[in-house]
Image (tube, rainbow, N blue to C red):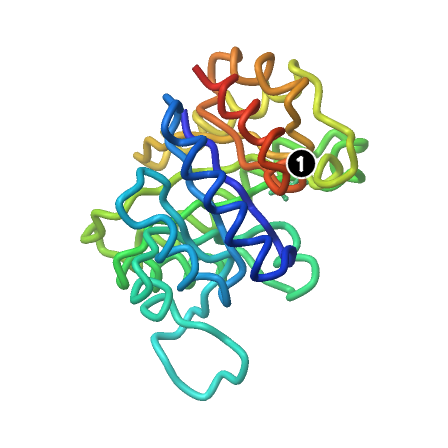
Amino acid sequence: MIIAANWKMNLSRQNAGDLLKSYRDISADASASLITFVPACYLALAEDVLSKTSVQFGAQDCHAAEKGAFTGDISASMIADFGAGWVLCGHSERRQYHAETDNLIAEKMTQAAQSGLNAIFCVGESHEDRLSGASVDVVTRQLTTTLQHWQAARGGRSTQSLVIAYEPIWAIGTGLVASLEQISEMHAGVKACIAGLGITAPVLYGGSVKPDNAADIFALADVDGALVGGASLDAEGFSQIVAAAR
Ligand code: PGA
């Protein structure tokens, strides 16, 4: 099992340091692998607190280019330079607020792999897609467009890990969690879709994962862990989620 924490744009430097120290303690008893996605300005802090621990860390986005005139952006190699092993690609908030397309996400994943970063690639449908019965089609399109582009660009050379996160947009930060049946159906669909591309990867669920629903979600056959947003900011709640991942 993999439990990944997505802090988004939260926490002061002081609080970030304290939470990283709590993660260090949580990892001592954890059987799951822990990965934390910190705001980029806290990468040095994460490197400092998490070195010599089993908690891995990464950034929430990277640019698709290697370097250049991209004011305000951060490259994959800069992220790797801080000892980070991971980057999140294609989170729905990046798709929504930064107009990221399936192809751009593939370019970011390629750049990440070339810089030695592993990627968690996020997919998920909107509420309208869910209501109109288009969820499977939307997620299949996101997976195939991005992963085919990524496979072609990397030319089979990358040895970096790929993890998929299925995050229904309507369940992110809303307190609305997808039903166990909905999660099972989509995770089986994601695994079948990537198998058709010759890819095997763990598939995490994300969207209002909390201490009181984590164990039921982790018991589902095709769920390999969780990407946790809001609940990852509270050390006690996060430790309960990690404990549920046995
Ligand atoms: P949430 O966020 O757990 O707060 O719903 C999940 C995510 O956006 O990765």
Measured as percent of width and height from the top left, residue 2 is found at 42, 30
**Which residue corresponds to the image point at 53% horizontal and 84% vertical from the top-left?**
71
Question: Would you identify the image quadrant in which residue 198 lies?
Answer: top left
How far across and how far down the image is residue 128, in percent? 80, 40
What is the count of numbered marks? 1
Q: Does 185 sit above or below residue 26?
A: above
Say whether residue 95 is left or right of residue 200: right
Seen from the viewer's position, the closer of residues 197 and 199 is: 199
For mark 1, does the 10 Å Cα neighbourhood hold few (<14), some (14 to 19), or many (20 or more) residues? Answer: many
The amino acid beneath tag 1 is Pro
Residue depicted at 31% across the width and 38% down the height = 54
Task: Determine whether 66 is above or below 228 in the image.
Answer: below
Q: Residue furthest bottom?
A: 69
Q: Is residue 21 left or right of residue 33?
A: right
Drawn side of residue 141 relative to residue 28, left or right: right
- Image-quadrant location for residue 39: bottom right
* Residue 207 in the image: above or below residue 142: above
Q: CB of residue at label 1: within 8 Å of ligand 1?
A: no
Residue depicted at 22% across the width and 55% down the height? 155
Q: Which residue is mark 1?
A: 168
